[in-house]
Image (cartoon, rainbow, N blue to C red):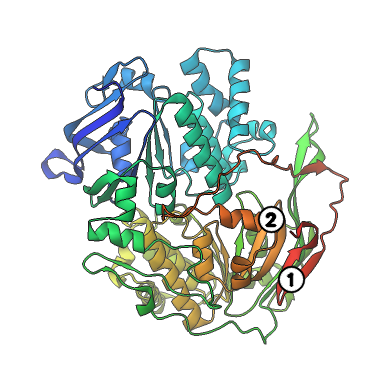
Amino acid sequence: MNENLVARVENLSVAFGPATNASPVVRDVSFEVRRGQTLAIVGESGSGKSVTSMAMMGLIQRAGGRIVSGSMHLQTRANEVIDLVTAPESVMRQHRGSSMSMIFQEPMTSLNPVFRICSQLTEAIVLHKRCSRAEAQAQALRMLDLVRIPDAKQIMNRYPHELSGGMRQRVMIAMSLVCEPTLLIADEPTTALDVTVQAQILRIIRELQDSLVMGVIFITHDMGVVAEVADHVMVMKKGETVEHGAAREVLQAPRQPYTQALLAAVPKIGAMNGTHLPAKFPLIDDLAGTIPADSVPAPEVAPDYESPPLLSVKSLSIRYDLKAGLLGKVRRRVHAVEAIDFDIYPGETLALVGESGCGKSTSARAIAGLMPIQGGDIMFGGKHLATLNRHGLKTLRRDIQMVFQDPYASLDPRLTIEDSLLEPLHVHGIARGAEARRQVRDLLERVGLPAEYAGRYPHEFSGGQRQRICIARALTLSPKLIIADEAVSALDVSIQAQVINLLQDLQRDMGIAFLFISHDLAVVERVSHRVGVMYHGRIVEIGPRRSIFENPHHAYTQRLLSAVPSADLDVPRKPFSLMEETVPSRIYDIDYQAPGMDYLEVAPGHFVASSALM
């Protein structure tokens, strides 16, 4: 191999199933990765991107797959060439984590739930760098600081389930980079991260790549990220390479209709300027390329602002106790949410945006009655949640439903889809027998799935289909409010467009209100009526979507919008400072009283924290 090459893959084919009836999922894929360069592999879910990376890491056999043909070679820093197809497991184990490393998309399934973060970070350092435990801990702490985790020392002693999804992903990124590999395979590493942290992570990977002369394979469905990081781009569809070339050529002058359709379907910040109501996304069509956005009917019904608010949140505060000492005495508390206020009206979509760990999901769980609050008041339909008895809470959960980020974790793998959808109907006594099954089939058809799919299990569906099933389950009880907590964050652009268009149709037809929690500002701009920006547990700016996006006042809102990556290479890119400010801690002594926050109305319905006006 040429000394500038890190990895070479030639005519790789991977199949699943028995040899007599194998199903090929990757066919004749070839590419090279050079030192100091990034190859971006893009495509929709099911295109074979992750299977290719798993084959390179020697993990495909564990997933039930096998390499049918082709070759894969890795060149280490010592210029030793490793045959990744024929190398024994002992050799692969030696190079996994040191010579090549991988950032996985789902941190909750990648981190060991029974070990603390400290143990998992230091394990690889001790194994591959032969250093003491104290030196390993110091290096692990440095990496957590590098990926901007607040209170890194505290995080080191926590378990994965105690961290938010974005925090877990940052831990995974630190873990993969801690041994300074020759080749880094990043499989959707920033999907769960907000744009500011995403920009920081991309910058970290680029700086480490430059200093270590490291090759990077970046797997993503986000064309904006591709434009930020890629030197070369390979587009995959149904296991095959559709287009391969220099990033500028592929992004600015794509030759294949499929690549053109992918780029046209990417939501762009500013596309909604001058409009007040949400609009549908264009859809990718395999034959016709892209259906223009103006050919997709827009939602016709505006929110009912004349009626009383459906949901009213006043001075909501949520704390987590931190116990210390032998007796577990509470001495400090995490101020997760600090005195936030907002209303949601019938038929309205309010979006909450902000970095991971800012309190968005915590607020949503409190609204759904899934966790206690320590201050403030939540009113739904004119009733105070704090005064509801058990029967009242059951009724509340009928009127408020949630759609979570990970649809596979939301569905019981042992139940058929029909059983999962029948359960809420039985629990709330709405329907039984043939009538209940008829309602289930009607719901499946309403979310765009054939009724005969009712007898299948969750693992038989794609990610987008599973998310549609979760939406159908949320609709079984005819709720008044649906909380969509990062419901489309992990979906590729085509499936994302289908799911969001479905939500908008349901809002138009059924008058459902949505609390839409997301870090994808281009999606938020298209789906929301109003937007609330959260930072450090507080809402720092809230108002009509058009006013927030076209005239942001808070410094953090401006920073969020400026950090959104664009697929247009001609757009000027603002240098992003990694450590321009310290990450504020939200852990305080037990007797700490948080100061109040005053708001100034800068436009009709547009409020901003007055202490942070620019």
Q: Is residue 475 above or below residue 339?
A: below
Q: Residue 178, labelled with which disc?
A: none
Query: What residue is drawn where x is 32% and y is 18%?
Result: 91
Query: What residue is drawn where x is 64% and y is 67%?
Result: 551
In this rendering, position of residue 60 left or right of residue 544:
left
- Which residue carries the number 1 mark? 602
**Residue flagged by tag 2: what amino acid is it?**
Ala
Q: Secondary structure at mark 2?
A: helix
CA gap between label 2 and label 1 equals 14 Å
Residue 209 figure quarter? top left
Q: Secondary structure at mark 1?
A: strand
Q: Residue 612 location, x and y as percent?
A: 76, 57
Query: What residue is drawn where x is 40% and y is 77%?
Result: 439
Q: Quadrant of the N terminus?
A: top left
**Residue flagged by tag 1: what amino acid is it?**
Val
Foreground pick, 348 / 21: 348
Q: Residue 277 location, x and y as percent?
A: 53, 78
Q: Residue 433 location, x and y as percent?
A: 40, 75
Q: Residue 555, labelled with which disc?
A: 2
Residue 194 in sight here? no
User: Who comes first in sequence, dot 2 or dot 1?
Assistant: 2
Q: Residue 491 location, x and y as percent?
A: 41, 56
Q: Is residue 182 above or below residue 596?
A: above
Q: Are marks 2 and 1 in contact (CB under 8 Å)?
A: no
Residue 157 figure quarter? top right
Total numbered labels placed on residues in the image:
2
Q: Quadrant of the C terminus?
A: bottom right
